[in-house]
Image (spheres, rainbow, N blue to C red):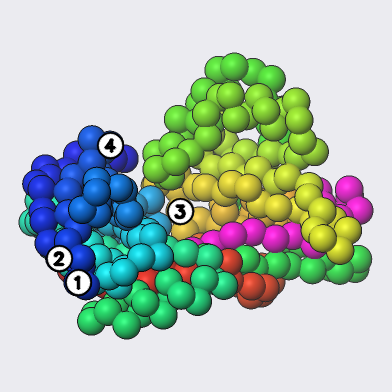
Amino acid sequence: MGITLLLSNISNVGGDSMYTIKDSERKNIIEAYDEKGNLVGEAIISPFKASDIHEHPRMNIYFDINVNDIEGKNDIKDQMFDEIIQRSRTISENYKDYVVKVYHCCFSDNKENIEYYSSKEGFKNDEGMYVIKKELVDNEIFELKEIKGVEFCYLKFEDEHEMMELVEKQNKIFTSGYSVKDLKNFRNNTQWFSIAAKYKGEIIGNIVVVIKEDESKVEYGWVDDLFVSKGWRKLGIGKNLILKAFNELKILGIKESRLEVWSDNKRALSVYRSVGYKFYKQTECSIGMFL
């Protein structure tokens, strides 16, 4: 969910050269120009309400700064950083009931950015995107918990109404969820399966698993999506969906399941660990601070 910022022009000096930092015509972009009017750097600031994974409502303010390798580069970058923090504080004033975090996110091997942002006062490299995996052993038995009134069934993504219902329910959980077009692409272009949890015919949870192959030619089941609707959590539905997916993968001869999870998603991590997932690698780092 994008939020429009009220922006104002800024001018300042970088090193021994004069640079101008001003707002772009593009939404939520700050630009830096040299004395000749050449674009030498830009920064994006993107506020959005976080997905429903935290204990309290959360507003995330993502930003990224890129400056050409020129004289005064660090001064320009620092100036843009200070401006972003100032604007983030202004944004946070409008969200008193939210936990507000301003942060930069980059791949885990981007040492330059990790070192730069970690050096800023109050900023910590304390969150990230994890890939976790579960090895499926031949003799392992997955027992499902009986949940009164809840049935589990496969979705084939052939019923337009059913696809629209799934999209609606999933989009209530995630800010960037599936579309009907996405589901049709799964149906037509990939090896996959989807298992839904239903109560009186209504979808209250779902898991989508795509069969992939890594660089070592190892096949695994990638959990592309998993959700349980509000009001139906803490009943074991999510765990049952995962266990049913494990059983389906074993039928397909797939020996491993993997998924991505944000390190701060404590609720999901607890479920994943309870069924045997273990840390595999970190792919992204989030460096930031709470305002």
Residue at 73% across, 45% down: 210
Of label 3 and label 1, which has the lower sequence position? Answer: 1
In the rendered view, would you say 223 is above or below 268?
Answer: above
Q: Which residue is mark 3?
A: 233
Residue 160 image-quadrant placement? top right
Q: Nearer the viewer, residue 48 or 151?
A: 48
**Residue 255 vs residue 122: left or right?**
right
The CA span between labels 2 and 1 is: 7 Å
Camera-near label (2 vs 4) is 2
In the rendered view, would you say 220 is above or below 110?
Answer: above
**Type of amino acid at the residue the image marks with label 1:** Asp
Q: Residue furthest top?
A: 160
Helix, strand or loop at label 1? It is loop
**Residue 258 vs residue 191: left or right?**
left
Q: Which residue is mark 1?
A: 16
**Type of amino acid at the residue the image marks with label 3:** Arg
Asked whether residue 219 appears in the rendered view, the answer is yes
**Residue 230 vs residue 8: left or right?**
right
Label at residue 26: 4
Helix, strand or loop at label 2? It is strand
In the rendered view, would you say 7 is above or below 247?
Answer: above
Proximity of marks 2 and 4: CB atoms separated by less than 8 Å: no
> Is-magenta flag for residue 43?
no
At label 3, counting other C-alpha atoms closer than 10 Å, the crowd grade (few under 14, some 14-19, many 20 or more) is few
The CA span between labels 3 and 1 is: 59 Å
- Residue extent of the magenta highlight: 248-265
Q: Which residue is mark 2?
A: 13
At label 4, counting other C-alpha atoms closer than 10 Å, the crowd grade (few under 14, some 14-19, many 20 or more) is few
**Residue 34 vs residue 51: left or right?**
left
Proximity of marks 3 and 4: CB atoms separated by less than 8 Å: no
